[in-house]
Image: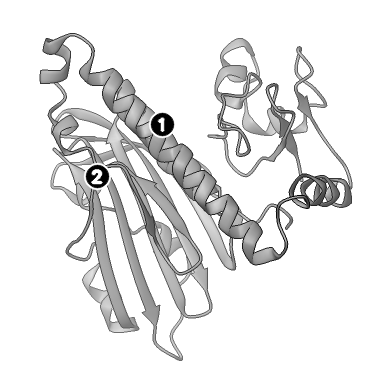
């Protein structure tokens, strides 16, 4: 396991994706993140990045056998206030939620305090309602728009394999969308990873939409769910979008989480980073 040390709080973030930019502990931007690192490198592949011993400023560290040290560090920091594992999880959840909501509130106010012509070009601002939602009893996410029931994005044939299905979406103005689909596969049926990854959200299924780039698949674990993640870009109605596609599976239970947003909108990009951070806070750190 490779780790990226935060230059603010020195927390060692496990690297599970190329999009690790903000510290999972303090929420601040990490100087040696891959996105910034690759801009100054001739050979900027992610593989080169994660196999490097350090970057020029020494923030990126490849750590061997760090599990006992990390567990001990977390235990020492929480032992004065936390009496049990349940209380520790509750504290992390409450703190994470408050930080995400505060950040969302500040972003919204910052947007409205700017030039009026700029806010008029962002119609989604009127719909912003930052809140925390449970994707499952164990997994929570912070979303900028109300999460509402929606139609399924699963292909028709797939419903023949399911015993239960629930779809919901946090969306505004065809600018930003978080699609969440929970379903159970019937006994005796199996769905392979490729089929899961090929499930797209409503934006990506829109006639005329073309996928312009797709990343390699990352594997991680979110709570007890084995998770495959992939991201890329697509074009819809002559506008460029970025997407993140997560597939969580545990036994017969599956959850699809797809984030889509306009590529050239910096505020929406920040919204997406907050959503992604909130999901990544559920990652099991000691795999």
Quarter that holds the C terminus:
bottom right
Q: Nearer the viewer, residue 48 or 147?
A: 147
Helix or strand or loop: what does disc 1 sit on?
helix
Q: Which residue is mark 1?
A: 103
Is residue 183 something one can see in this rendering?
A: yes
Q: Is residue 88 left or right of residue 281?
A: right
Residue 31, relative to residue 206: is it above or below? above
Is residue 154 something one can see in this rendering?
A: no
Q: Say whether disc 2 or disc 1 marks the residue closer to the N-terminus.
A: 1
Q: Which residue is mark 2?
A: 145
Residue drawn at x 24%, y 44% as measured from the top left: 145
- The image position of residue 45, as x and y in percent, is 62, 27
Q: CA distance from mark 2 to mark 1?
A: 14 Å
**Picture quadrant where residue 25 is located:** top right
Q: Nearer the viewer, residue 203 or 48?
A: 203
Colouring: one colour
Q: How packed is label 1: few (under 14 Cα within 10 Å), some, or many (20 or more)?
A: some
Residue drawn at x 45%, y 60% as measured from the top left: 247
- The image position of residue 230, as x and y in percent, is 47, 47
**Picture quadrant where residue 106 is located:** top left
Q: Which mark is residue 232?
A: none
Residue drawn at x 54%, y 59% as measured from the top left: 227
- The image position of residue 95, as x and y in percent, is 53, 45
């Amino acid at each position: 396991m490779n780790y990226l040390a935060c230059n603010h709080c020195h927390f060692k973030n496990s690297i599970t994706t190329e999009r690790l930019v903000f510290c999972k502990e303090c929420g601040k931007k990490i100087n040696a993140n891959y996105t910034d690192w690759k801009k100054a490198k001739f050979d900027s592949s992610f593989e080169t990045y994660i196999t490097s011993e350090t970057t020029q400023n020494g923030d990126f560290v490849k750590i061997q056998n760090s599990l006992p040290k990390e567990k001990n560090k977390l235990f020492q920091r929480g032992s004065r206030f936390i009496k049990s594992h349940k209380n520790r999880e509750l504290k992390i959840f409450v703190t994470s939620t408050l930080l995400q909501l505060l950040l969302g509130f500040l972003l919204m106010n910052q947007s409205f305090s700017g030039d009026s012509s700029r806010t008029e070009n962002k119609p989604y601002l009127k719909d912003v309602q930052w809140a925390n939602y449970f994707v499952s009893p164990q997994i929570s996410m912070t979303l900028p728009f109300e999460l509402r029931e929606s139609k399924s994005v699963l292909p028709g044939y797939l419903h023949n394999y399911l015993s239960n299905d629930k779809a919901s979406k946090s969306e505004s103005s065809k600018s930003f969308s978080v699609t969440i689909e929970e379903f159970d596969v019937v006994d005796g049926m199996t769905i392979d990873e490729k089929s899961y990854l090929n499930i797209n959200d409503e934006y990506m299924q829109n006639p005329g939409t073309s996928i312009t780039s797709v990343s390699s698949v990352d594997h991680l674990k979110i709570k007890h769910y084995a998770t495959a993640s992939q991201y890329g870009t697509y074009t819809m109605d002559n506008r460029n979008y970025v997407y993140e596609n997560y597939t969580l599976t545990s036994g017969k239970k599956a959850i699809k989480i797809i984030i889509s947003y306009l590529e050239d909108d910096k505020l929406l990009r920040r919204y997406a980073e907050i959503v992604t951070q909130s999901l990544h806070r559920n990652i099991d750190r000691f795999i």
